[in-house]
Amino acid sequence: MMLDLERLRKIWALVERGGSAGECAAAKDRACAIAGRHGYVLEDIPVLLAGGNVHKAREIRERQQREKETQRQEAEEALAKKAALKAHRQALRDQANEITGRYEGRLFHAMPDEHILVEAVQSYALPGWRAGYEWSSSALEALRSALPFPKTIDDALAELNHWTTLREDRQFVRRAYRQASQDGDVMPEAVLKRMVILADLVQFELPINTIDDLMKRVSFQMDTGKGRQMSEATNLEAILRDLAAVRQIHIRETEAPESPDPVQTTCPPKPRHNTATGRRKEIEAILASPESQKMTLREIASRVGVSPATVLNIRRRMERVRSI
């Protein structure tokens, strides 16, 4: 059965120009029932009545729906990203406030040691507010003399960690508040130069005394984020030097002279007698002395040059004589 377009047009006219809302709804349901028997949907009816291409109209509607859905998803994603960015910035500000609080609001003020280092090399500053310093041997010596440099790897690592933490805290707070950089780095150049020297002390210069020191040095050299990067040959040369130093310490400790035997200290060995009579008299003299109470038969025999059995026989003979 063919679709009766005239009938459908009359019913649709009630939808478009109907009286009450109930009449419009009833007419729409009736039009959908008629069009549905021929495979059409509600949106196809205006196209059918206008003589248009239903399939092309459907493609246009589907494309428009996809575009609308895409726009909706993009809008939702944009809102989600905006909310996430807002939350991230708030978290950064909270962390920055916590860091600032640890420094009691003086994070970007010159610390006492910072002030000492800057003042020590002030006379070596080049002209211009961003010109830096002329790092001559005299300037480096002034920097070294301003604050005593550490003597051990642990102390050097502790000071370097102090400066590194201060620098990272300042950089974090600056980024959290999106502050523009006015002076380049957040640390004075004098402090940055001292950090370089400290890194050299840890990597190459400070003597090592234990295997732990050597392990800390190698770990530091492997950490590419600290210190200056040297060539592999330079690193290996430093490691070999340190291994040789540890080896010498080990040799000195293992070859240290043993403490003297307390028995030998109190009773220095006497020259051995060549005759049996002489050896017997020497054994009798030792057994008669108070020191024999602290000596074993083997120790007495070793001193005189006889067997422990000989010492035992002489001691028994002396005990029999004393008992008579």
Image (spheres, helix red, strand yellow):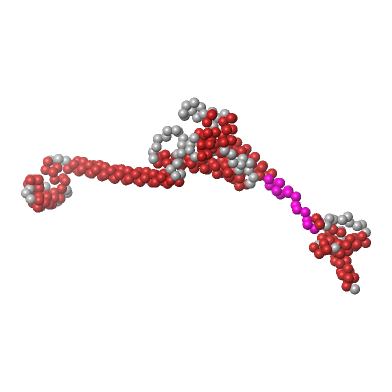
- Would residue 227 be found to the left or right of residue 107 on screen? right
Q: Hey, which residue is sitting farthest top in the picture? A: 127
Q: Quadrant of residue 270?
A: bottom right
The residue at 61%/38% (across/down) is: 205
Q: Picture coordinates of residue 107 (x, y %)?
A: 45, 41
Quadrant housing residue 233? top right
Whether the magenta-drawn stretch holds residue 134 is answered as no
Question: Would you say residue 313 is visible in this rendering?
Answer: no
Q: Nearer the viewer, residue 205 or 323?
A: 323
Drawn side of residue 253 relative to residue 48, left or right: right
Figure quadrant of the C terminus: bottom right
Magenta stretch: give its range: 249-264
Residue at image coords 65%, 43% = 243
Tell me: residue 260, above or below residue 147.
below
Q: Residue at x 54, y 42 (%)?
A: 159
Along the horizontal axis of the image, is 177 left or right of 145? left
Residue 148 appears in the picture as rendered: yes
Nearest the eye: 35 or 290: 290
Q: Where's residue 34, x and y in %?
A: 12, 50
**Residue 151 image position (x, y, % from top left):** 61, 41
**Above-or-below relation of 2 to 266:** above
Q: Quadrant of residue 81?
A: top left
Q: Nearer the viewer, residue 115 or 284?
A: 115
Exactly how many numbered labels are in the figure?
A: 0
Give above or below for 38 relative to 130. below
| Residue located at (84% from left, 55% from top) | 268
Instruction: Name the residue furthest bottom.
Output: 324
252 magenta-colored: yes
The picture places residue 186, in percent across and down from the top left corner, at 46, 36
Which residue is at the front of the view, 176 or 25?
176
